[in-house]
Structure formats: structure tokens, C-alpha cells
Image: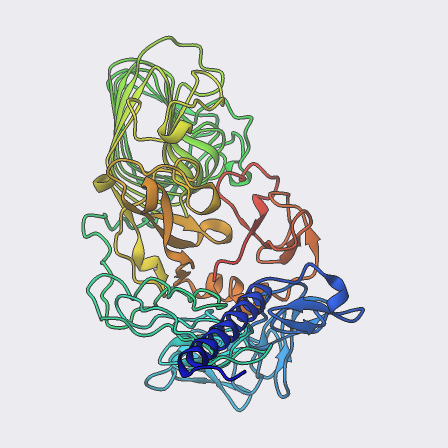
């Protein structure tokens, strides 16, 4: 039977459409399989695992090391399912760092042979000089951060093995899998990040990698990370490009720690009823040794009667419980390089003023406010402390209502600036921080029990006890590098301001804010108010690296990912900058650091375990 031309055309179209439909179903099926590990182990031979449509040995595959999607970085190989350092001659493994002894200033001529300040290493010898124009000194080596894959864009920022460093940005050079989709997206290099473009369709190894395109150069940030193409991993946040980062606030005071002149020993202490001017002497005594953070001190080196003033001195080591104010008093230009239980205790009523002073090394609180006095703390520096201020802390039985004002504060490595009881109020202005986790937290009187009266059912401000706004907080941006932020305002704390899978509702006035990140809180990352009024990570999960060269070297991705020792998060450790893997979660990398909130450990150090911060 002969078909008419109309029926022939209908039949041809039907066959063509059917073929297309079958093809689309096959592609969808392949794409779905490529996006995630196969659940059918029988598809791969024994000893191999399906990752992005390919059967790979995760024990040795550098793109899927230990599990699918865990990629090693430049300078590493995959050994027994872990990314391990792999130094190529003439480099040596110097404590987790591949160093060329002919040119590395930290390991000049051999491991652990550092050059002096102002010197570089040439031909295995230390010589006076500096890096050539266009180069930066990273982990002892002079490198071009525009092209160095271990220090791409900034010291310590290592690219993945599948990436190259181009113009200071890690850019994918090959796909990591998925039929039809792009590979791992590269770093956005422009102002507003573009989308990761999909690669050319290919077989199981994927097509040409998608790359985050350079968006329009802006005046805000270097760009939010590019969105992954089909089957691609999302790109990393932009590192600058044509955008401009916000500057550090000019309102943050520049407080310089003074040098003492002469010394004076007060033995078991003294009482002050008028004015005691220490003449910038070091004041020593025979009380508890505060250089060890002794928490059993109760006797002060100086007791100040109502109306008294103490000024111009630097405390020594054996000063016990520091200064006790029994009524109104003024503490001015007084510096505590060591703190025992407290540096200053306020026991009376009246008015207490503490200004132009500084504190270091307080395991817990620094200024204890037990009495009913109205307190003003202004132009104060605090470093390595649990808290700068606490009202009615543990053991306080007073039913008084207290108020305090904290202004022009610089805090480095502090767990909380202020801890306030539910009876009391603290007002905060111009608070400048780095490595500091909470601005103000609320507790039940006389205890360390946290309340749930703060933002998002946490104990963190702002609220009626902790009075401040986002404009009162400032990140010390000069202490970090590598991420151009759109704000320098600081989130109120770690628990009421969460992004990611446990994101919290956005806090009024804090649409964008910075949080401490990476072990020890050495970096900042930005979170922003997004979909459904929840926080998301404005710069991705990427932390800005510290400008401190020692911290940057020891927190570098290439070093930390070489860890093999299993450790316990928050547990005590003995050697600063030692590295490990969280025993309860092998995805977390751990570093032994001075961790705010854990200074009560016998030697101040604690394991801080976190997911990737790069």
C-alpha cells in the first residue's frame, strides 16, 4: 500500500520527534548520574567508585580524593584517600611546606634556617635585599601572586590541581565530569560575577570546563562566586577584579602599647585614697603570678578608695587581682600585659571611668562590674581575652541594676567584648575587632548561664541589655587580605547570625556583616540577607586570609590539607600551628591555635576544627 505524501510527512515527523524524545531522556539520565555518585556499586569494578560518571579510585584520584568532589590543591597528591604534600626536587618538606632551600628565606640552605628581617635567600645564602618588583614574599619565597598556583591573588591561596592561576585568580583549565555540563567553575574576576558557562558536551570525563566569566567591574566587590553550569561545581567568589573594597573605618582608634620606664615593687599591695601616679613605672608585687593566668587571685595590688585615681603605670607579673575600686574612681593610662582572675574589679557605687588603657592575656573576663557604679570605658585596647567587660559574673550576689558605656574599643582575639546580666545594660559605640566572635552577650546574674533573649533565640545582641547598632561595629580590615568586602560592619555573634544549612533570620540593621572565620578566627567572611529573609554567604565560604605572615603561612590550604593526625575539636593541644583532622568528622581540618573562648586550657591552646576556609 502506497502512503500519501501527507502521511509520509506525518510519519517522518513522528519518527524524528520520537528519536529526539528518546535522546533527551538518555541525556537527562546521564546528566543525573553525572551530578552525583552512583548508588549502584555494581556499575564500577571492585575498588572503584562512580564519581561524575567515571569509575575512579578515590584512594589515589587527586580530583576525588577519599570521596567524590574532594580535590587536592597544587603541590599535593592523593595518597590513601587523603591529600598529601608532594615536594618536587629541589624542594624539601619543611614542616608541611615545600621549600626550595636555594631561595626560601625561612629555610635558606636547609629546613628551619630562617634569614633575618630585611633579608632574602639567594643561592642558599641569606643576603640583604627584598623581592623583585611585582613579587610578594609568601612563606619565605618571592612569588608572583598573579600566576603562582600556591599563592594565587594572595599569600596562602592555593588553586586546585585542575586550575591555573591567571591574573591572580584560580581558573579551571579542564572539566571534572558530567556529560554535556561544564567542569569546575573558576574564580570570578570581575565586579559582578557572571555565570559559569557550560562546557562542550563530552563523555564521562566531561567537556571543556566552564569558567566564571568576568562580570561588570563594580565599586562593591570583586564579584559573588559564579553559578555552576550543568553538572559543574559553583565558582569561587571574586578576588577583586575591577571592583573596589570598602576601607577600614577611620573611626577606629590607633592605640599603641607603651614602654615602661623604671620599676617599683609594692610588695603585698597598697591603698590609694587620692591620686597615685606611677610615672610609667612597671608596678611589681609579691602576689599571684598573672603571667600564667592564675585564676585564684583575690587580693589586689592596688585598692582604690572612693574618689581615688590611679594613672600612668604598667603592671608587672605578680600583681594578683589587679585594681579594686571601692567607690567612684578613675583609672587612666594603666596597662596590664598579664591578667589573673580580673584586671579591674568594681565593687562600689558612684562613677567609675577607665580610659586610655590596655589589657592582654585574660583567660576569662578583664573588667568585673559587681557594684552599682555607673561605668565608662573609653579608648581601650584588649587582646587575647575571654571578655573585656562582665557585669555581675559568677559569684556576684548583688541585686543592683548596673549600666556601662563602652566606646572606642580595639579588640584582638577576644571571645566577647561584653557579657551583661539580665538586670543590667551596656551601651556600645565604635567597637573595632579582629579575631573576635561576639560583640555583646546576655547571661543570668551571677552565673555563666546563657539566656535566649537575644537575636534568633541566642544570647547575642543587640537587645535591651546590649545596646548597639551595626554602625557601632567595625572590622579591622587592615589585618586581612584577598577578599574585597562590601561592608566593614560586624555581625553580633556566631549563633544569632548564621548562614548555610543552619541559616538564621536576618537581624534588623545587619543586612550585610562580617564574621570571624578559619581556625583562631584569623579571617573574615561576609554574610548577607538573602532569600526568605535568611542569611547566605556573600563571599561564598571563602575567608579573607590574615596579613600576618606567620598566621597566613600556617593556615595556608596547601599546608593544612597535608594533615593526617586525628584530633578532637576544642581539645587541648601543645604546639601552636600543629595540624590535624577532626576525629569525629574527617571533612574538618584542625589547627592548634589560641582560640577565643578556650583560653582556660592549661596552656591556652586548643584544636580548632573547621570545614574548608579557602
Q: Position of residue 394 (x, y in %)?
A: 48, 19
Q: Position of residue 153 (x, y in %)?
A: 38, 73
Residue depicted at 47% across the width and 62% down the height: 614
Task: Tell whether 328 sits left or right of 71.
Answer: left
Is 201 located above or below residue 606 in the figure? below
Quarter of the image with the N terminus in it: bottom right
Q: Nearer the viewer, residue 399 or 14?
A: 14
Q: Position of residue 189 (x, y in %)?
A: 32, 73
Q: Nearer the viewer, residue 159 or 263?
A: 159
Q: Nearer the viewer, residue 482 or 47?
A: 47
Number of on-image labels: 0
Q: Nearer the viewer, residue 18 or 418?
A: 18
Q: Position of residue 243 (x, y in %)?
A: 24, 68
Residue 54 visible in the shown view: yes
Residue depicted at 64% across the width and 43% down the height: 571
Kindly give the residue lying farthest to the top in the view shown.
399
Amino acid at each position: 500500500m502506497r502512503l500519501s505524501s501527507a502521511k509520509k510527512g506525518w510519519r517522518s515527523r513522528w519518527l524524528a520527534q520520537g528519536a529526539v524524545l528518546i535522546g533527551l531522556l538518555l541525556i537527562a539520565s546521564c546528566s543525573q548520574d553525572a551530578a552525583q555518585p552512583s548508588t549502584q556499586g555494581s556499575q564500577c569494578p571492585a575498588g572503584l567508585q562512580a564519581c561524575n560518571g567515571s569509575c575512579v579510585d578515590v584512594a589515589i584520584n587527586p580530583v576525588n580524593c577519599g570521596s567524590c568532589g574532594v580535590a587536592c590543591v597544587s603541590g599535593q597528591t592523593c595518597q590513601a584517600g587523603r591529600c598529601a604534600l608532594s615536594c618536587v626536587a629541589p624542594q624539601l618538606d619543611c614542616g608541611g611546606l615545600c621549600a626550595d632551600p636555594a631561595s626560601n628565606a625561612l629555610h635558606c640552605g636547609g629546613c628551619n634556617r630562617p634569614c633575618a628581617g630585611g633579608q632574602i635567600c639567594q643561592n642558599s645564602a641569606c643576603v640583604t635585599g627584598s623581592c623583585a618588583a611585582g613579587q610578594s614574599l609568601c612563606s619565605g619565597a618571592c612569588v608572583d601572586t598573579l600566576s603562582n598556583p600556591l599563592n594565587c591573588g594572595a599569600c596562602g591561596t592555593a588553586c586546585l590541581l585542575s586550575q591555573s592561576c591567571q591574573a591572580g585568580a584560580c581558573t579551571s583549565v579542564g572539566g571534572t565530569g558530567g556529560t554535556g555540563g561544564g567542569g569546575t567553575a573558576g574564580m570570578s574576576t570581575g565586579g559582578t560575577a557572571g555565570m559559569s558557562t557550560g562546557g562542550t558536551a563530552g563523555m564521562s570525563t566531561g567537556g571543556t570546563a566552564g569558567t566564571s566569566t568576568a562580570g561588570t567591574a563594580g565599586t562593591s566587590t570583586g564579584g559573588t562566586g559564579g553559578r555552576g553550569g550543568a553538572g559543574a561545581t559553583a565558582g569561587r567568589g571574586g578576588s577583586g577584579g575591577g571592583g573596589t573594597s570598602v576601607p577600614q573605618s577611620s573611626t577606629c582608634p590607633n592605640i599603641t602599647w607603651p614602654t615602661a620606664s623604671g620599676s617599683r615593687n609594692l610588695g603585698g599591695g597598697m591603698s590609694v585614697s587620692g591620686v597615685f601616679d606611677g610615672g610609667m613605672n612597671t608596678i611589681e608585687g609579691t602576689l599571684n603570678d598573672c603571667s600564667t593566668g592564675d585564676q585564684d587571685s583575690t587580693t589586689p595590688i592596688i585598692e582604690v578608695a572612693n574618689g581615688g585615681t590611679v594613672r600612668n603605670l604598667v603592671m608587672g607579673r605578680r600583681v594578683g587581682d589587679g585594681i579594686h575600686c571601692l567607690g567612684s574612681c578613675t583609672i587612666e593610662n594603666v596597662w596590664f600585659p598579664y591578667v589573673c582572675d580580673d584586671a579591674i574589679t568594681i565593687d562600689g557605687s558612684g562613677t567609675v571611668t577607665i580610659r586610655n588603657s590596655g589589657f592582654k592575656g585574660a583567660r576569662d573576663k578583664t573588667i568585673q562590674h559587681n557594684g552599682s557604679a555607673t561605668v565608662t570605658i573609653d579608648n581601650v585596647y584588649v587582646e587575647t581575652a575571654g571578655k573585656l567587660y562582665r557585669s555581675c559574673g559568677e559569684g556576684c550576689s548583688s541585686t543592683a541594676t548596673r549600666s556601662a558605656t563602652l566606646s572606642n574599643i580595639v579588640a584582638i582575639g577576644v571571645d566577647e567584648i561584653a557579657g551583661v546580666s539580665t538586670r543590667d545594660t551596656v551601651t556600645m559605640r565604635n567597637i573595632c575587632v579582629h579575631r573576635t566572635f561576639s560583640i555583646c552577650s546576655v547571661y543570668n546574674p551571677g552565673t555563666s548561664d546563657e539566656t535566649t533573649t537575644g537575636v534568633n533565640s541566642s544570647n547575642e545582641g543587640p537587645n535591651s541589655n546590649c545596646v548597639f547598632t551595626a554602625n557601632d561595629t567595625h572590622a579591622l580590615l587592615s589585618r586581612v587580605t584577598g577578599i574585597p568586602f562590601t561592608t566593614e560592619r560586624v555581625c553580633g555573634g556566631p549563633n544569632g547570625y548564621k548562614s548555610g544549612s543552619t541559616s538564621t533570620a536576618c537581624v534588623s540593621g545587619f543586612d550585610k556583616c562580617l564574621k570571624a572565620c578559619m581556625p583562631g578566627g584569623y579571617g573574615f567572611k561576609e554574610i548577607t540577607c538573602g532569600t526568605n529573609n535568611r542569611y547566605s554567604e556573600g563571599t561564598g565560604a571563602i575567608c579573607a586570609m590574615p596579613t600576618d605572615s606567620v598566621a597566613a603561612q600556617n593556615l595556608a590550604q596547601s599546608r593544612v590539607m597535608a594533615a593526617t593526625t586525628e584530633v578532637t575539636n576544642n581539645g587541648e593541644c601543645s604546639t601552636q600551628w600543629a595540624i590535624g583532622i577532626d576525629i569525629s568528622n574527617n571533612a574538618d581540618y584542625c589547627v592548634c591555635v589560641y582560640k577565643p573562648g578556650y583560653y582556660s586550657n592549661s596552656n591556652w591552646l586548643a584544636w580548632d576544627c573547621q570545614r574548608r576556609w579557602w
